[in-house]
Amino acid sequence: MIGAGGVGGVVAKKMAQNHAVFSEFMIASRTLSKCEQIKKEIEQFIPTKSVVTTAKVDADSVPELVALIREYQPDMVINVALPYQDLTIMDACLETGVHYLDTANYEPKDVAKFEYSWQWAYRERFEKAGLMALLGCGFDPGATQAFTAYHAKHHFDEIHYLDIVDCNNGSHGKAFATNFNPEINIREITANGRYWENGGWVETKPLEISQDIYYPKVATRKSYVLYHEELESLVVNFPTIKRARFWMTFGDAYIKHLSVLEGIGMTSIEPIKIKGVEISPLEFLKAVLPEPSSLAANYTGQTCIGVQAKGVKDGKEKVHFVYNVCDHAETYKEVQAQGISYTTGVPAMIGAMLMLQGTWKRAGVWNVEQLDPDPFIAAMNQWGLPVDELAGIELVKD
Ligand code: NDP
């Protein structure tokens, strides 16, 4: 695995728990001490038979990646570094003949824009090499696509309206912090919103559309329409969808901080020169903000992430909701991580397991909804993310 941040720590610890499948793995990242810290925590907290090694690697460099992969000879690489590294790691996997998985789609560092076209362009090369690349196998993207495939397989003949909802009703006690990499997070939230309707994308201003949504077992929270990457592949793979939206909760204090930071230019990705050093204000801000992994110890509350589908089954209209609730304090007790890292890291471990066991293995580049959701959801129930369902109640209104 590459990346030793909040998500990386969870992936490593869940692999260590699942040592029957992950008998040997390497934690590699830019900062070796972070890999070693995760290894130390595994030795301290997780009973395991996995043989764990660590290494330093700059994942922006294909030759460095190739050298490390040749030396270690893994079956696959789990990429939980940053979206900027997706293509270099995919190139290195192709060159060395190993399978690939990530949790976020490629984004160039100098353009705040993400889309699948760059990674879908690798389809033929992975197919020809007999290798699999599984894209976006975290929670959202990831589990949300498995939930959609589950709706389609078990509950609907046709899905017409899809609403993905993501609520973090937790509190970390800091004035302002992001739950995953601040740079990636802020780029996502400050971008224009977008949703799919009647065969095309409708663009909105950032956080322009909102409504109160009830999140079962958690709370009713104001939620905002954001553009999120899984929408792009879901509307392709489920062409009966007439409208697809993604909603996320933000507290008033979070939005206030963000709008001040934006107003004074601190979220800009345009580099400026300070004392001879070129740095973008957003990179600087990332260095000042708390690391996502450091939020874990005092985090309380829960997340609720799910997918509401509306459509027809046997000629009748219906609505159905599939979701998971995850408790920040529980995940801290289990793997010393907050819920956002946990809900991303567990599906990444599960996707890797299903690939290694052959259940999901197929050559080419794939999105999660293209694969059988049943073994994935069964593994979520087994590995700490229980999945629940609610029939007949419309949580997200038109
Ligand atoms: P962090 O910032 O906590 O961790 C990122 C890690 O990647 C750090 O260890 C960092 O190293 C390492 N890294 C960065 N650049 C390089 C490089 N060039 N070479 C090697 N290692 C590098 O982020 P998170 O753990 O919160 O997020 C990890 C990924 O998960 C991101 O891509 C994020 O978008 C994705 N994500 C996906 C979600 C989903 O549900 N699908 C939800 C949340 C996150 P260093 O320590 O030196 O900075």
Image (tube, rainbow, N blue to C red):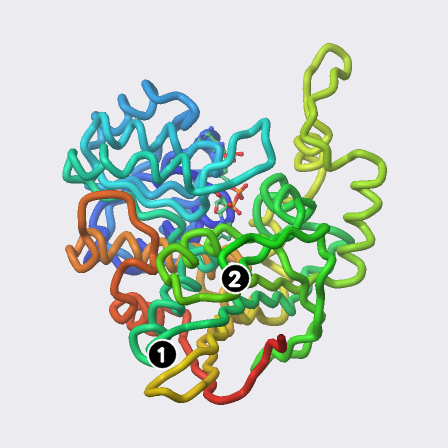
47 relative position to 246: left or right: left
Vertical order, 75 against 168 (above or below): above
Q: Position of residue 74 (x, y in %)?
A: 21, 37
Q: Please state the total of marks drawn on the protein image.
A: 2
Identify residue type, mark 2: Asn
Upstream in sequence: badge 1 or badge 2:
1
- Tell which of 34 and 73 is nearer to you: 73
Image quarter of the C terminus: bottom right
- Amino acid at dot 1: Phe
Residue at 32% of width from left, 33% of height from top?
90
On the image, the x and y values in percent for residue 117 come to 41, 38
Camera-side residue: 167 or 342?
Answer: 167
Residue drawn at 32 percent across, 70 percent down: 377
Could you say where residue 369 lies in the image, as x and y percent from the top left? 34, 60
In the rendered image, is residue 6 in sight?
yes
- 117 above or below 311? above
Q: Report the front residue among 205 and 130.
A: 205
Task: Please indicate whether residue 151 sits to the left or right of residue 170 in the image.
Answer: left
Tag shown at residue 198: 2
Mark 1 highlights which residue? Answer: 156
User: Where residue 10 appears, x then y in whole percent?
Assistant: 43, 54
Judged from this view, the residue extending furthest toward the top is 276
Q: Which mark is residue 364?
A: none
Q: Quadrant of residue 116?
A: top left
Residue 44 visible in rendering: no
Q: Is mark 2 on a helix, strand or loop?
A: loop
Q: In which quarter of the image is the N terminus?
A: top left
